[in-house]
Image (cartoon, grey):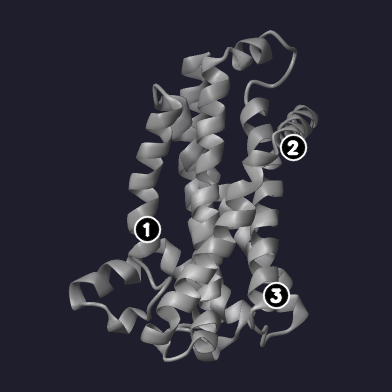
Amino acid sequence: MVRDSLILAQRTVTKMVRNPEQFIDVTVQPIIMTVIFVFIFGGAIAGNSHDYLQLTLPGIIVQTIMFTSLTIGVNLNTDLKNGVFDRFRSLPISRSAPLLGAVSGDIVRHTIAIAVTLAFGSLIGFRFLTSPLEVVGAVLLMIVFAVSLCWISVFIGMLARSSGAVQGLSFLIVFPLTFGSSTFVPASTLPTWLQGWVAINPVTHVIEAMRGLLVGPSIMSPGTTVGGEVAWVLGWCVVLVAVFFPLATWAYRKKI
């Protein structure tokens, strides 16, 4: 199964390289989002763009990953409609290999998105205030979370009737999770009823962990620790995979 998945992961990467427009959302989008929020809203929210950049860049990385994880469901739904999975079914490979291969291949997109955001952020003034090991840990944590998140998109992609429906349903999930968090403003500035949602929102824990690993505990919300937030993120990753991997596999087998 591992060998089959790696071969199909290579297919996914090759498909991306032959269609460079698939990289727009992981190269151009994070740059545009950073410019919009840092230079347009930074002065009003934090008083100056530099301080706001330190606060919000980790959140922009998380937001970018949330949106790029939607693509896999759209692509798999398109392959399903085009009969690609009928061909896979005729091959002597593990039945779950096409899904595992697609998710593994998407790691390339996630890595590019993180690298572009960090590189552009550094170019305009973002400073890493932690050790290189912690920065590497932040990147690895983000990739693990991205892979776990992909299984939700895969599940939706297997159930939806069209690629447009996949995108629409995925956005309904991603928007409240992304914007109903501490991505762009401290949770303490939000209304009390919204603070309750932010506190239980898994995206908030991811953002706090990224801030702690990239900038340091001083920029994290009061009462949080780097180790505690990382543990929360890893716990959520286990839950996402445990729930949505079997569901995605079940939906895939029903389709084929």
Q: Residue at x 56, y 31 (%)?
A: 75
Figure check: 107 above or below 12: below
Check disc 1 and report its element: helix, strand or loop.
helix
Find residue 133 and report its horizontal and vertical position in percent: 76, 77
User: Dot 2, crowdedness within 10 Å: few (<14), some or many (≥20)?
Assistant: some
Q: Nearer the viewer, mark 2 or mark 1?
A: 2
Label 2 – label 3 distance at C-alpha? 26 Å
Task: Quickly name the residue at label 1.
Answer: 177
Q: Residue at x 45, y 28 (%)?
A: 163
Query: Is residue 139 found left or right of 150 in the rendered image?
Result: right
Check disc 3 and report its element: helix, strand or loop.
helix
First in residue order: circle 2 vs circle 1: 2
Find residue 102 and report its horizontal and vertical position in percent: 65, 34
Query: Is residue 139 found left or right of 80 in the rendered image?
Result: right
Label 2 – label 1 distance at C-alpha? 28 Å
Q: Is residue 247 visible?
A: no
Amino acid at dot 2: Val
Task: Quickly name the residue at label 2.
Answer: 13
User: Dot 3, crowdedness within 10 Å: few (<14), some or many (≥20)?
Assistant: some
Find residue 161 and report its horizontal and vertical position in percent: 39, 21
- Circles 2, 1 touching at the beta carbon (< 8 Å): no
Task: Quickly name the residue at label 3.
Answer: 135
Q: Residue at x 76, y 27 (%)?
A: 4
Amino acid at dot 1: Leu
